[in-house]
Amino acid sequence: MADPIRVLLACPQEAASLDLAAHRRNGEQLQVVGSLKRGEDTFEQCGRFSPDVLLLDVDTLEGNAFQLTKRLVLEHRETAVIFMSSSKEPEDLRRAMLAGAAEYLIKPTEAESVAAAIYDVIEVRAERAGSDPSPRLPVATPAQCKVVAVASGKGGLGKTTIAVNLAACLCTGTESTVTLLGLESGDCGVLLNLAPKHSIAELSAALDEVDLELLEGYATKHESGLTLFTASRGSLGGEASVVTVDCALHVIRLLRESRDYVVVDTPLFQTKQEMVVLEAADEIICVTSSWDLLAVRNTKLFLCMMPEGCQEKTKIVINRADRTDMIRDTHIQKTLGMDISAVIRNDAKVVPKSINVGTPFVVGEEGTSVAQDMVQLTRLVTGSVVAAETHKRRAFKLFG
């Protein structure tokens, strides 16, 4: 006979009416190992009893139930926490799930429904423990992770296309763990043919309770191996939400703990306060154009608005370059006061096709010139080539 499921009751008002031992399922039974009184240290008693399940009455708990649950989940991983609350507010349910609660029961409750919830939670945990986890690459340390922000001073320059293809190229071309973080619209999901179920904007309301384990639940996996976090849910970039600066910085800090590369598709910044996100990047790819004078002008303004120290880690990339462009490289460099680090050639067939089918061109059209330009940019990011060499090689092939 299997060992009974050990249950610790932290619900003084409900404990007397919960005859859990009377409810069995498939030969399993429940054993109440302890019943805490109001004011007792729940965390300490969990360490003492080592229960499989903690039944936590949020209404009678003295203290922050969400913080307690987060601490329990981290330090007593063998214990599943089930919330009991009189609140029907979706926000409380969401915060409970973010904190790591396995179930949320609305009072008043009956012993039968509570027992069923306990069995369901234990069953799910058993299935997860018995599954064969996918092999993982070695976890990078925060010092090893490189955060690359892709930004521009004007819309319509292909910033998101470069961010998506850079992330895909890093993922497929290196044995690295790569995440793409889309902070504005859902275009990243569209370009990858993904329909994210969650938006990281949802995390803002309870940011202090979000750790890496909880954050991973908001990831969408791409077949190339990269993971996507985005501000929108669904296909075609639907239901986009605003990601606050604090939320973006918190997510980036957490991702540094487990990734080799984090590519951030930044929004078009409206204020200097929003540009603080750039300070979290190790490198900034600033996308501009050699066919649009306004783009060069807005890029200059964008560079001037950057927080102190950000220009020094910024690389200028010309996108959709063509031999017929009227603005010379020398004019762009003089206007911006910076060298051009890379040039991505224009391809009016390959790039639109890749966008429409939702496959990065570095994966689906890797033999094309535009894909090879992205490979060179990727090598620049990884340190395989230096900026001056990259620009010289690309400029020769483009204009020679």
Image (spheres, rainbow, N blue to C red):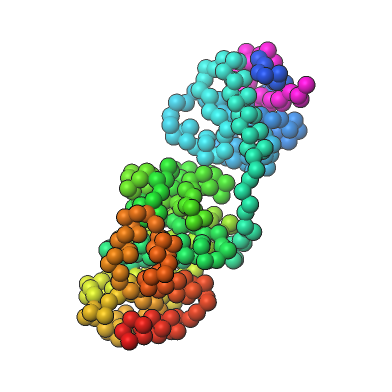
Q: Is residue 346 left or right of residue 381?
A: left
Q: Position of residue 326 (x, y in %)?
A: 21, 80
Q: Is residue 16 magenta?
A: yes
Snapshot quadrant of residue 315:
bottom left
How many numbered tags mark residues here? 0
Placement of 296 over or under 168, stated as above or below: below
Chain part drawn in magenta = 1-22
Residue at 45% across, 71% down: 375
Placement of 332 over or under 222, stated as above or below: below
Q: Is residue 205 magenta?
A: no
Residue 374 visible? The answer is no
For this orientation, the residue located farthest to the front is: 367
In front of the other: 128 or 7: 128
Q: Is residue 343 left or right of residue 122?
A: left
Question: In which quadrant of the rendered image does the N terminus lie?
Answer: top right
Residue at 70% across, 20% down: 28
Q: Position of residue 339 (x, y in %)?
A: 37, 82
Q: Position of residue 312 (x, y in %)?
A: 44, 77
In front of the other: 296 or 41: 296
Residue at 57% across, 15% down: 110
Residue at 40% across, 85% down: 392
Question: In which quadrant of the rendered image does the C terminus lie?
Answer: bottom left
In front of the other: 121 or 195: 195
